[in-house]
Image (cartoon, helix red, strand yellow):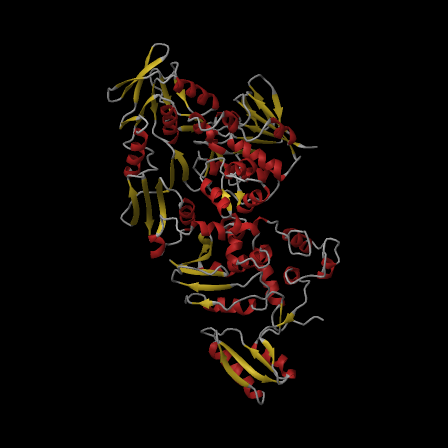
Amino acid sequence: MRQKLMVIGTGMSSLRLMETVAAEAPGAYEIHAFGEEPFLPYNRIKLSSYLQQEHGEGTLYPHGTEWYEKNGIVLHAGKCVTAVEPQKQCLWTENGERWDFDKLVIASGASPARLNIPGDGRENVHVFRTLEDARRLKETAASKGRAVIVGGGFLGLEAAYGMAKAGTAVEVVQRADTLLNPQLDDTASRYLQRELEKYGISFHFNTSVREVTGESAADGVILENGTELSAEAVLFAAGIRPNTGIAETGGIETRRGIVVDDFMQTSAPGVYAVGECAEHRGRTYGLVPPVYEQARTAALHLCGSAPAPYQGSASYSHLKIAGIDLFTAGSIEETTDSHVLKQADSTRPLYQKVVMTRDMIQGAVLFGDTATADDISNRIRNQKPLSVSEKKYLFSGEGKTQKLVQCAAETTICKCNQVNKQTILRHIAVTDEASAATIQEDTRASTSCGGCANDVKGLLQVFDQCRNQAAPNVFCSCTEIEEEEVRHRIFSGTWQSAEDVYQSPEWNDSGCDTCRPALLYYFSLTGRAEWEKAPWIHAEKDGSYSVISLPLHTGEASEAMRRWMETEQEIPGSRLTFEAGSRLRLSGIPENDVTGVCQKTAVPRFVQPGAHLLPFTLEAAQQQMMLADLEEKLFPVSFPASFTIRSTSAFSEELPRYELALLWQDNRWEMHAEGDGGRMIIYAGQGPELEEMLKAVLQYYRETAFFRETFADWVLRLSPAVIRETLLDEDSTPLAGMLETHMNAAAPENTVLQS
C-alpha cells in the first residue's frame, strides 16, 4: 500500500519536491498538494516578465493537469490548510476536512511585509507575490495613472519597470540611500537608477511612507519627511516574512522560519519544511537556487535515498531589471584587507566590480555584462586565488566559449533545474531547428532565474564541437549497456569474471581495446582479477632482467641505496645505475634471481590491472615519511586513471587534472583538485587526520570513478560537498580500511601471479 505524502503549498519549492519524488520513486507515494491559490502550480519568477508583458499567462505553468494525473498527484487548489497535528499524523483544512498522512512537507512560503501604517488597508493598496497580484497590477498599469512603490529591492524595481513600460507614472520610495541595498554599491545603484529613470520612474531616498491617504480607496501617500505624493495605486514591496503559522499550530519549532536540519526535517518526526518558510542553520532563503536545493534534498530523503546533507546556499542573484543583466554574489564590502577590481563604462551601460582578499574573490557585482558570472561564482565557492593574467582578463569573459566546449558532459548548466550539458546537447542533436525556446520547453533549462540563458545559447553555437558528448555513455562498441550498469553488474556479483561479460547476450564480441582494460580494472576492485607482472621488471635482449626501484625520498634514500648496492655486489655482472624520478635500475639480473632482488629491495613483483600511480612530489616538510610509505604501498594498486599526489606549502597556480594537491597552510592540510570550474577544496583538517582521510578519499575515488576518469573530473562530477560529507560521515572509516586491505594484498610478500 502506498504511503500518503501531504504537501502544504503549491509554490516553486513544493513543485520541485513533487517532481523529484515522482522521478526518483514513481508510485511510492499518494501525493496530495494543498494550495491557497486557485491555480495550477506556476513559476513565480516569471511574474515580473508577465507584468512587463514579455510572457503570456500560459507560459507561467510548467505542467498541465495531465502531468499531475499521470504522476498520481492530487491538487487541492484554493484549499487552505488551517492546522496540523504531527502526533496524530493529520492536517485540517478551512472547511473542516481531515487528511491523514504518513509524511508531511510544509512549503508555505512567505508573505509580503506590510508597514502597519494608517491607510494600508484601503482599496488599491497592493503587494506583488501572486498571480492574482500580477493581474491586478497589470490592470492598474493599463489605466496609465500614477503609482507609488514602497521598496527599492528586486521585486519593487521589477514591478516599477513593468508598470512604467505600460505607461504608468511610477515613483519609488526607498528607505536606504541606494537601490538594491546591500547587493549593490553606490556606483552600481546610480547606474541602475539612471536606466530606470529613462522610463519615467522617479525616486525618493532615505525616507518611507508614513500614511496612505484617501477615503475608501488610496489616492496618495505622505512620506516621513512630509512630502505628499498622489497615486491611484500603492504597492508595498518592502521584504517578506516566512509563513510559520501552520507549523506553530502543530507545536513544531520555529524561530524566524520553521527550523529544519540538514535533511530539511523539522522537530516533528516525518514532517519536513522547504522553501522560504524554512530556517536552516539560522538562515532563511528567498531565491530560486537555494529553495530548489532544499526541495531536492528533502525529496531524496523521502525516497529513501542518501542525499548529501544540505549545507546552506551561496548568496547570489542573477536576473534582469529593465532589460539589463545584473549579477550579485557574496560580500562587496571593502575592508582594509581587500583589493578591488573595477571596470565601468557609463555609455553602454557597464559596471563590474570584484572584491578580493589575498587574491581570492569574496564578492562581485556585474551590471550590463554578466558573461563571467559562472566563473566568478565558482571562484567564490572554491576560493581559488587569481593569477596576474586571470585578473587581467577577469571581466572580458575570454575563453568562456572554450570552457563551454571543454567542460564535462555531466557539468550542470542550469543550477535551478539541475540540467546538465549532455541533456541539452542531446536535445539539440534530435530536434529539428533546435533553439533556446525548444531547449526551455523540453529540458526546462533557463526557465527559472534565467541566469544560465547565455550558456544555453552558447551550447547551440558550439554544438558541432561538442557533438560527441550528446551520445549516450555506452561502455564500448561491444554493447549498448552504459558504463554505470556494467559497474553495477560487476560489483553486485552478477558477473564474476570477464568471461561472464563476454558470454552475456548483451555483448557482441570477446572484448575490445576499450572494454578489456576497463573490465580488468573494475574486477580488480572486487578482488576477482588476475595480477599482472610489474611494469618495473623488464626482460632484456640478452636474456637477463632489470628491476627499477620505486621512487626514493629524503629520509629513506640512504638505507634504500645500501640495500641496492649490497644486492649489486651479491649478483656478479649486475650494474646499478640512476634513473629519472629519483629511481635506481639494477640490470644484468639472471631470471632465477629476480624474485630475490624484489624481496630484498621491497619492490612488488606483481600489480593489479590498472596500476596507474605516478611518483609523488613531496615538497612540504610535514608528514613526508607517511606520504612516502603510502606511495610505496600504492604503486601496485589499481587506479581508474593516472594519478599522483603533491604535498606543498606554496599555492600552485595550476594543477594537472590527475593530481591531488595537499596544501600545508596555517598548521592544517587542505586537499585541492582543479577542474573546469577552477580550484576545488575537498577537505581541510589537522595533521593527525590526514592519513586516514587521504586513504578514504583515494578508496572513494577508486570505487566510484569511471575508468579513465581523472581525479579532477571525478571531484567535479560528484562535487566536493558530497565527497566531504562522505569523508566526515561516521561510516566512512571502512573506506580507509578497504584501501589498507588492497595495499596489504599488493605487498611484495603477499602477491602471487595467478595463472
- Residue 504: % across, % down: 74, 55
Whether residue 541 is situated above or below residue 731 in the rendered picture: below
Please identify the quadrant where the N terminus is shown: top right
- Residue 712: % across, % down: 50, 56
Please identify the quadrant where the C terminus is shown: bottom right
Would residue 163 be found to the left or right of residue 292 on screen? left
* 503 or 696: nearer the viewer: 503
Would residue 353 be found to the left or right of residue 755 on screen? left
Please give the count of numbered marks on the rendered protein.
0
Whether residue 503 is situated above or below residue 120 in the rendered picture: below
Would residue 726 be found to the left or right of residue 387 on screen? right
Residue 86 at least partly seen: no
Would residue 243 be found to the left or right of residue 519 on screen? left
- Residue 733: % across, % down: 56, 55
- Residue 256: % across, % down: 43, 31
* 138 or 262: nearer the viewer: 138
